Amino acid sequence: QVQLVESGGGLVQAGGSLRLSCAASGRTFSPYSMGWFRQGPGKERGFVATISWSGGRTDYADSVRGRFTISKDTTKNTVYLQMNSLKPEDTAVYYCAAKLNILSAYNFWGRGTQVTVSS
């Protein structure tokens, strides 16, 4: 099994920055890709960003492109989400997830970390 633990959430003013981390442990960890998702108040969980584990190819939701940066450290089995120019609408629980192969869904999920952006 794979365990994912997010950290780095908190309360920040609009325009501020936060850096989320997601540490993976468990079986030998070599996913196809890692992703960040979020669920805001009264909303469904949605895609934020993804990064391929071997090549580092990234993709972002339109709402965060240019403000958020996803990165990884394969030596630490950790993926990061640098969030800049935060807006109140970025308020959500942020989850990381792992996709083990190209054909699978995101199989493993963390419990989430709360990000609150005040206006």
Image: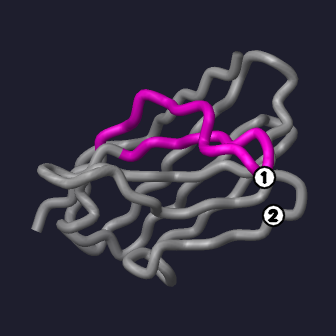
**Residue identifier under label 2:** 56
How many neighbours does mark 2 have within 10 angstroms: few (below 14), some (14-19), or many (20 or more)?
Answer: some
Residue name at image x 47 percent, y 62 percent? 48
- Could you tell me residue 99's position as x and y percent? 69, 43
Residue name at image x 42 percent, y 56 percent? 18
Q: Which residues are magenta?
A: 94-114
**Residue identifier under label 1:** 102
- Residue 98 vs 85, above or below: the answer is above
Q: Give the structural element (helix, strand or loop) at label 2.
A: loop
- The answer to if 100 sits in the magenta stretch is yes
- Could you tell me residue 31's position as x and y percent? 79, 41
Check the picture and name the quadrant holding the C terminus.
bottom left
Check the picture and name the quadrant holding the N terminus.
top right
Dividing the picture into quadrants, the one containing residue 51 is bottom right
Q: Is residue 1 left or right of residue 112?
A: right
Q: CA distance from mark 2 to mark 1?
A: 14 Å
Q: Nearer the viewer, residue 14 or 112?
A: 112
Residue at the outermost front position: 103
